[in-house]
Image (spheres, rainbow, N blue to C red):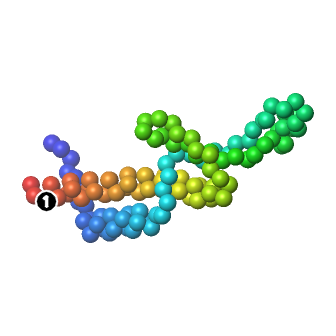
Amino acid sequence: MPRPKTPVDRERAQERLRELHRQIAAVDYVCSGTLHRRTKLCGKKNCACGRDPAARHGPYFQWSRRKGGRQDNTVIPGAAVPGFRRAVANYRKIRTLLRAWEDESAKLLLSQENTKA
């Protein structure tokens, strides 16, 4: 005999869904992927970058993501870095919120089936 399902507080679940919607709607920019900070060696014989890691050229910032099934790397100007950092963090936050939305939706939908039976 299957175990009885615990009853779902439908009003509370609906409130959680409304809160998830509000949090998702509050997000402005969204970018998947990763932001990398790079420094480079120029390869010139007399340049200090080859002897001292602190003297390397840069930093340069690169945004990496999957686009059309392939890796896409884009160099980002320094002034755009704070916005991209926020957009990448927002993307991760939204993914977490969507998982929670899915869980709450499933609970509500399953509880509807239980009330009809």
Q: Position of residue 65 (x, y in %)?
A: 51, 42
Q: Secondary structure at mark 1?
A: helix
73 sits left or right of 14 in the view: right
| Residue 9 image-quadrant placement | bottom left
At 43% across and 36% down in the image, what residue appears?
69
Give the total of numbered labels: 1
Q: Nearer the viewer, residue 5 or 65?
A: 65
Quadrant of the image for the N terminus? top left
116 sits left or right of 104 in the view: left
Tell me if mark 1 has few (under 14), some (14-19) or many (20+) residues whose alpha carbon lies within 10 angstroms of its own: few
Q: Is residue 36 visible?
A: yes
Q: Position of residue 47 (x, y in %)?
A: 87, 36
Q: Nearer the viewer, residue 80 or 103?
A: 80
96 sits left or right of 51 in the view: left
Quadrant of the image for the C terminus? bottom left
At 65% across and 53% down in the image, what residue appears?
77
Q: Is residue 16 visible?
A: no
Q: Nearer the viewer, residue 91 or 105?
A: 91
Amino acid marked by disc 1: Thr
Q: Nearer the viewer, residue 92 or 82?
A: 82
At 66% across and 59% down in the image, what residue appears?
79
Q: Which residue is mark 1?
A: 115
